[in-house]
Image (spheres, grey):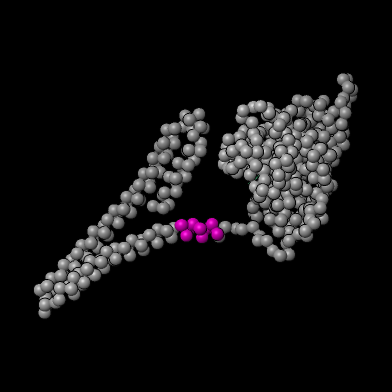
Amino acid sequence: MSNARAPVLGHFGAAIAGLTSIRAYGAEDAFKEESLNRIDRYTKSARMFYNLNRWICIRIDLIGAAFSAGLAAYLVYGRGIQEASNIGFSLNMAVGFSSMILWWVRVLNEVEVSGNSLERIDSYIKIEQEPKPTEGGQPPAYWPASGDLRVENLSARYSTDGPKVLQDLSFQIKSGERVGIVGRTGSGKSSLTLSLLRCISTEGSVYYDGIPTSAINLDALRSNVTIIPQIPELLSGTLRQNLDPFDQHDDAVLYDALRSAGLFSVQDEFEEARLTLDSAIASGGGNLSVGQRQILALARAIVRGSKLLILDEATSAIDYKTDSAIQSSLRNELHNVTQIIVAHRLQTIIDADKIIVLDAGKLVEFGSPWELLQNEKGMLRALVDESGDKDALYAAAHGKPVAEGESL
Ligand SMILES: Nc1ncnc2c1ncn2[C@@H]1O[C@H](COP(=O)(O)OP(=O)(O)OP(=O)(O)O)[C@@H](O)[C@H]1O
């Protein structure tokens, strides 16, 4: 019965969360049917459970009643006349005893049913865990003083027997550099960001400010790197709580971060629905657009002040104008912060200090954008040539506007 109840509740929760999509795709009937099937399954076992309960109740009551009646007959008509007080006491105990037996049966039954939850907790405990923090894994207090990153022969895979999704990557990023990662879909861009955080199993070495990341505790590493994923996660509460959950900064710092992240360039100061520090945020950021969520995640990253900031297509849902405003704020506001930017949109990273081009998990090009564009057979050049605004990209990579008719 416990096993059948969870799917009913899960399906109900999912249906409520996706109500708009269900209505939009006209999938009400399919959902209703699935829901009824799950309720049927639950009802079958629930009915059996309650019937068994009644079964045992009636039998124990009958046995109890027969025992009490037998005792009463014995006490009244049996050998020697007993005192009324003794008879009353014995009968009272006999009736109480039979209801106690029933109570015990019910309690034991409950324990068995609840054991199911223990079994589940046990199976969760037995899943493979990440290494626990150790004394030796504590980094020095000054670490990280810079965002220097050195990667040597880094390979990664999602499971121990899975294929290598990154193969022998080696590169070095100086503190404060903006580095773009480009490559076709599935080339390993997101996997590279995950392996820097040791979220997937890796081989080779990654040195962050001179210390190998494999030698430090995971919590220390991850609290010193900020990653903004494609769809950022927000918590329910106010915008202030989302930016600064531990109440460590004042409003001026938070407003500055919001400005740097570009929030004020996408909303009007007098707009009724504009976001302020006191705006309520629904769980998961459900009441914000994906673009707004990305801007808030950026602001949160600025407030955290890590030395290494990874943006995984973090501005993919923002229009080009706002994206370039954000990129220029990131360039100007985050001094001495190394930025690794995974971008599909080449405009976002074409003026980066360096670009890493990945292809099928291998690093095929690494250098400044202009340098890479000189290589006629290069992959970055091919990607730029394929794109719609090739000229603007060349100009941005070169750092100056290209005059009409000038040869690239
Ligand atoms: N959770 C996963 N388990 C197993 N393999 C995965 C997983 N996620 C990605 N992969 C594999 O890793 C390879 C690289 O994927 P990755 O997500 O890093 O690519 P990407 O360059 O970021 O792509 P995109 O531009 O579409 O985001 C792919 O071949 C993919 O099949």
Relative height, residue 324 to residue 202 (above, below)? above
**Magenta span has 405?**
no
Task: Using residue 278 as the reference point, say whether residue 390 is left or right of it.
Answer: right
Percent x, y of residue 248: 69, 49
Is residue 130 visible to the viewer in this orientation of the structure? Answer: yes
Percent x, y of residue 231: 64, 39
Is residue 153 visible to the viewer in this orientation of the structure? Answer: no
Task: Using residue 386 as the reference point, say whether residue 126 is left or right of it.
Answer: left
Q: Which residues are magenta?
A: 117-125
Relative height, residue 60 to residue 373 (above, below)? below
Percent x, y of residue 146: 82, 50
Q: Residue at x 73, y 59 (%)?
A: 216
Q: Quadrant of ligand 1?
A: top right
Give whichever of 335, 277 is nearer the camera. 277
Q: Residue at x 82, y 25 (%)?
A: 391
Give whichever of 85, 398 is nearer the camera. 85
**Magenta span has 124?**
yes
Task: Using residue 256 as the reference point, say whether residue 245 is left or right of it.
Answer: left
Task: Using residue 241 as the reference point, say whether residue 205 is left or right of it.
Answer: right
- Residue, far top: 405
Percent x, y of residue 104: 33, 65
In the picture, which quadrant includes the C terminus? Answer: top right
- Residue, far bottom: 80
Give whichever of 177, 3 is nearer the camera. 177
